[in-house]
Image: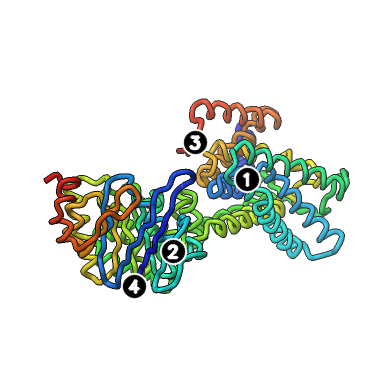
Amino acid sequence: MLRVDNVSAGYAAFQALFGVSLHVERGESVAVIGPNGAGKTTLLRLISKLIEPRSGGVFFDDQPLAGVPAHQVVERGIAHVPENRRLFSRLTTEENLRMGAFTSRAEYGNRLEMVYGLFPRLKERRHQPAGTMSGGEQQMCAIGRALMSGPKLLLLDEPSAGLAPVVVQSIFDLVRRICAQGYTVLIVEQNIRQVLKVVGRAYLLDAGKIVKSGTSAELLASTEIQKAYLGI
Amino acid sequence: MSEVFDIFLLEAVLNGLLLGGLLALLSLGLNLVFGVIDVVWICYAELIMCGMYAVYYLHVQYHWPLVLAMLAAIGIVAFLGWILHQFVIRPVLSAEPINQLLVTGGVLFFLQAAATLVFGIEFKNLGVSLPSVQIGEMSFSSSRLIAFFVALAGVLALWLFLSKTYLGTAIRAISQDRAVMPLMGVDPARIFRITSAMGGALAGLASCLLVLQYDIHPAIGLSFGPITFLICVLGGLGNMVGGFVAAFIFAQFIAVGGFFFALEWGYVIAFVFFIAVMFWRPRGLLGK
């Protein structure tokens, strides 16, 4: 479904990704793990066309995304939950969700019901400015906003970042539920131990290069990952 | 004796209210554009001047019915707002704020000079004189009454648009986080164009109301441009509710202050109040 082919990218003089390749198949949940500054966020920004690759290509449903402006990526079926959630803090929860359905207004009613079914808490808070909710609720709202576009592929950028440990657990439970519902998910995370319990497969990204890939079980068992990232 | 006094005071308060509605409409377009695009249209009042000339020429020279001339003027100024954005603002969107101020300031003088060349310096007016309305012992100019109710209707229509529609919600959203908008499937450049045309349309609506009350000349923008800008700053630049409230406060200072002293004193008191507020709340009454 998604194929990233030998992509290099960066900002001005700084190169963040060096020849990265990966693929995600329909119905899969895949993680890109790695330390801070490895290029994980850049990778997601590249897929949703917020930045252009310097070389290599991104293909979605076998169509190249080259030349597609960022605001048309959503209509093709890719929804991106950005780093730090990026809610419209002075808009209400429901208005944030409405923005998620900007490109698919006819479906608004059905999807709103679906998102409220998934996150009953958001329904209670629907008239509240998004900025006044707790971190976990805001993350739910950000994910709900992405689901409002009816995506084929959901990109999640560090959903657990900046949340209290108790909440982190519930966010991962939520991601697990979304994966179980049949959404195709690509998630980048620093919280390696937790995310590997949720996804089927993962890539390890370090200093802009894919250094390892495999099933979650393989990566959890790898001595390299245990030593470097899990502190075992 | 005191009865008469109270009636005149009431008249002053009500006239202040009427002026407030007009000032609220004036501040609306400027605030909308600043809130969304983060650029102050220093030449906003000159757009209004263009609209006033449009009404005048279409109605007086070309004999269009007044209402039709006004609707056309709103369209023309909306188009000017769009042009202003595409050809003047867009190239400096990522420039320093001072450069943005200077280019729109440049447009101010350009429009003034161009109007002097094309339309001449003599004062023009529609020659429409509407009767004044008597309520008891108080009298109100009916052009002011019309301006007040049309301005309020404009404010209400804009509020409904911004709160009830997808496009309106996107306009409020983009003022909070421009960079994330593409992820919602929204093209920020398109929202900017629409907002600029709407800012222009509001300036056009204001020009239709002002042309009923004032003579038109190339420098007319200077007589209400600064006050519009001050009201926006008083309310908190970019904050439309703030601008609305500030317009009514400012108008009361002018009207009631002018009643107790002389009309010019009303302005002096209003500006002293403005300066005091700037010390007390530099970001405006409702600024963040």
- Total numbered badges shown on the rendered structure: 4
Q: Which mark is residue B133?
A: none
Left or right of B229: which side holds A206?
Answer: left
Determine which residue is flagged by label 3: B285
Q: Tag 4 or tag 2, which sits nearer the N-term?
A: 2
Quadrant containing the N terminus of chain B is top right
Q: Which residue is mark 4?
A: A110
C-alpha distance separating marks 3 and 1 = 29 Å
Judged left or right of residue A26, residue B101 is: right
**Disc 2 or disc 4, which is closer to the eye?**
2
Residue B92: mark in rendering: 1
**Residue in front for this viewpoint, B283 or B147:** B283
Q: Secondary structure at mark 4?
A: helix
Near-viewer residue (A42 or B9): A42
Residue A57 marker: 2
Alpha-carbon distance for marks 1 and 2?
A: 32 Å
Where disc 1 sits, the SS reads helix
- Quarter-of-image position of residue B72: bottom right
**Marks 3,1: beta carbons within 8 A:** no
Mark 2 vs mark 4: tell me if same chain. Answer: yes
